[in-house]
Image (cartoon, rainbow, N blue to C red):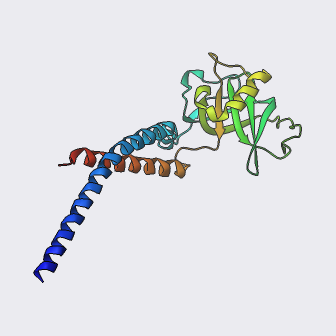
């Protein structure tokens, strides 16, 4: 019986040694991986920071005025705004799934508006787009300076080339109709996931740095 006990103790000791070695090796791998994860997570959080800031911004629209009376002195990118204007004769069309969107300019201004297509503005790729609805309209939405609207770069480019809008200080501004602060819960959820991911990897890194193999 004593021999069996000794063998069991020896096996337990060897198993403990192997587990310790595996654990030590894991620490050596986890720390660099955690650092890389922190860098990647930080970059992703930085890329969506403007969306997060807009989510928590004021839900009271900043009034930018109407045709001939625009308030250029209060222009601020990433704000919820409202304004009124006369649309340009031409626009830039695009599709997202089954939905058709139009980017039109407001005459004699640096403003563009991205909105859903209205009745009579139906368009399909490969077809000549119709002229946008010419009636003056008011709009509320998210205001983005040209440098902040990378997603809508093609719309900025096309409207600038059409020559019906007037850049101010070399820039155009886009109002994304209907995009309200606090409206996109997916942005907040994605940000929370990233924050938890960063915190988890930071904890893993700290634990790995504190532990030293003997």
From the image, which quarter does the N terminus lie in? Answer: bottom left
- Quick one: which residue is furthest to the left in this view? 2
Using the image as rendered, state which of residue 137 and residue 146 is in the foreground: 146
Q: Residue at x 74, y 29 (%)?
A: 105
Residue 10 location, quadrant? bottom left
Using the image as rendered, state which of residue 178 and residue 152 is in the foreground: 152
Q: Residue at x 75, y 33 (%)?
A: 104
Q: Is residue 149 visible?
A: yes
Query: Which percent across, then down, holds residue 16?
Result: 22, 63
> Along the horizontal axis of the image, is 36 left or right of 98?
left
Query: Number of marks in the image?
Result: 0
Query: Which percent across, then down, holds residue 208?
Result: 27, 47
Using the image as rendered, state which of residue 203 and residue 128 is in the foreground: 203
Q: Is residue 164 visible?
A: no
The answer to whether 154 is drawn above or below residue 40 in the figure is: above
Query: Which percent across, then down, holds residue 190?
Result: 49, 49
> Along the horizontal axis of the image, is 87 left or right of 202?
right
The answer to whether 145 is drawn above or below residue 102 in the figure is: above
The answer to whether 110 is drawn above or below residue 184 in the figure is: above
- Quick one: which residue is furthest to the right in this view? 128
Residue 69 location, quadrant? top right
Query: Which percent across, then down, holds residue 187?
Result: 52, 47
- Quick one: which residue is furthest to the top in this view? 169
Q: Residue at x 62, y 15 (%)?
A: 169
- Quick one: which residue is furthest to the front in this view? 3
Using the image as rendered, state which of residue 87 and residue 20 is in the foreground: 20
């Amino acid at each position: 019986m004593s021999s069996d006990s000794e063998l069991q103790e020896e096996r337990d000791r060897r198993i403990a040694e192997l587990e310790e070695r595996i654990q030590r090796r894991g620490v050596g791998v986890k720390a660099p991986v955690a650092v890389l994860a922190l860098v990647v997570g930080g970059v992703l959080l930085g890329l969506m920071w403007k969306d997060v800031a807009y989510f928590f911004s004021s839900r009271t629209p900043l009034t930018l005025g109407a045709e001939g009376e625009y308030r250029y002195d209060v222009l601020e990118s990433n704000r919820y705004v409202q304004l009124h204007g006369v649309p340009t004769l031409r626009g830039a069309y695009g599709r997202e799934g089954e939905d058709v969107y139009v980017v039109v300019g407001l005459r004699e201004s640096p403003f563009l508006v991205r909105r859903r297509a209205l009745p009579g503005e139906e368009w399909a790729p490969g077809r000549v787009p119709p002229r946008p609805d010419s009636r003056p309209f008011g709009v509320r939405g998210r205001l983005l300076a040209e440098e902040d609207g990378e997603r809508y770069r093609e719309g900025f480019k096309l409207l600038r080339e059409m020559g019906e809008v007037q850049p101010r200080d070399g820039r155009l501004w886009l109002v994304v109709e209907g995009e309200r602060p606090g409206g996109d819960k997916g942005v907040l959820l994605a940000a929370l996931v990233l924050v938890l991911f960063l915190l988890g990897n930071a904890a893993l890194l700290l634990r790995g740095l504190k532990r030293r193999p003997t």
